[in-house]
């Protein structure tokens, strides 16, 4: 089962995947971008370079296609927990403007060989929590676009998720870590 953990930076996705790896020790954990050697290079470019909107979208899609081919497809018979995926790509592209939802879905289906994830977990946060968490870390190129931008990306992800035919769970990222982990374990066990 292929499960995406989505949400803007600092919402707790990575922390939860790390905790879930202990519970589901045979799970494959990965991330986008950065789950393959190509993805590591793509991530560096995405976080450091000021790319055009189309170039940024195409780089994300290239990474997604490579990630699917090298990480997800060979392990489709196992539990795969991915820190980000196509929903982030759609959310960021829509927040950047000049793109249509249906076109983005079509491009992502192409990158994923028409094999969408079976579940999506979307972490939602608020302005105060986002500001608090951003104050404790060095910001990357995307985070430097600002709080308003990140909250817009989050809203675009939520809107997009509602339009897709994929079962999902929305998690309040403001909840305590242990409660979130318990909810996620139950959600995954039920899905399996």
Image: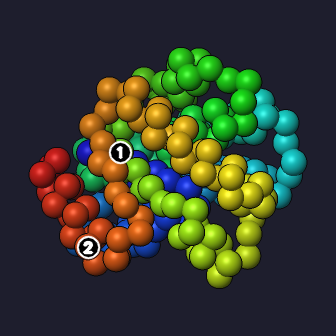
Label annotation for residue 120 = 1
The location of residue 71, given as percent across then percent down, is 46, 48
Q: Secondary structure at mark 2?
A: helix
Within-10-Å neighbours for mark 1: few <14, some 14–19, many 20+: many
- Give the residue drawn at x 75%, y 51%: 46
**On screen, 136 above or below 191?**
below
Give the residue drawn at x 30%, y 42%. Answer: 168
Element at badge 1? strand
Kindly identify the residue that appears in the image at 30 percent across and 61 percent down.
Answer: 27
Compute the Cα span from label 2 to label 1.
Answer: 18 Å
Question: Relative to 105, does residue 187 appear above or below in the rendering?
Answer: below
Residue lying at 78% horizontally and 61% vertically, measured from the top left: 144
Residue 31 location (% of width, % of height): 51, 56
* Residue 181 seen in the figure: yes
Q: Which of these two is toward me, 75 or 135?
A: 135
Name which quarter of the figure residue 174 lies in.
bottom left
Horizontal arrangement in the rendering, residue 118 relative to residue 84 (left or right): left
In the displayed structure image, the side of residue 111 where residue 119 appears, left or right: left
Query: Measured along the vertical axis of the image, is residue 170 above or below residue 57?
Result: below
Q: Please identify the residue farthest to the bottom as the structure is shown.
A: 136
Q: Provide the residue designation for mark 2.
A: 179
Q: Residue 44: give x, y in percent of width and height.
A: 75, 58
- Seen from the viewer's position, the closer of residues 48 and 30 is 48
* Residue 64 visible, this angle: no
Q: How many numbered circles does the render carry?
A: 2
- Per the rendering, the mark at residue 58 is none
Nearer to us of marks 2 and 1 is 2
Q: Quadrant of residue 188?
A: bottom left
Q: Nearer the viewer, residue 10 or 174?
A: 174
């Amino acid at each position: 089962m292929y499960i995406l953990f989505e949400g803007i930076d600092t919402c707790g996705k990575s922390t939860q995947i790390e905790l879930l790896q202990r519970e589901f020790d045979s799970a494959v954990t990965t991330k986008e971008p950065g789950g393959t050697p190509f993805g590591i290079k793509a991530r560096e470019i995405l976080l450091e370079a000021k790319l055009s909107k189309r170039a940024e979208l195409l780089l994300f899609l290239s990474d997604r296609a490579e990630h699917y081919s090298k990480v997800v497809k060979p392990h489709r018979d196992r539990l795969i927990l991915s820190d980000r995926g196509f929903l982030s790509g759609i959310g960021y592209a829509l927040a950047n403007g000049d793109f249509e939802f249906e076109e983005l879905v079509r491009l992502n289906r192409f990158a994923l060989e028409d094999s969408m994830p079976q579940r999506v977990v979307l972490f939602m946060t608020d302005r105060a929590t986002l500001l608090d968490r951003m104050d404790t870390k060095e910001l990357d190129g995307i985070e430097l676009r600002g709080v308003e931008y990140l909250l817009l990306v989050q809203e675009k992800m939520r809107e997009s998720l509602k339009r897709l035919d994929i079962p999902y769970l929305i998690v309040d990222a403001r909840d305590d870590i242990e409660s979130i982990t318990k909810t996620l374990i139950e959600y995954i066990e039920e899905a399996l």
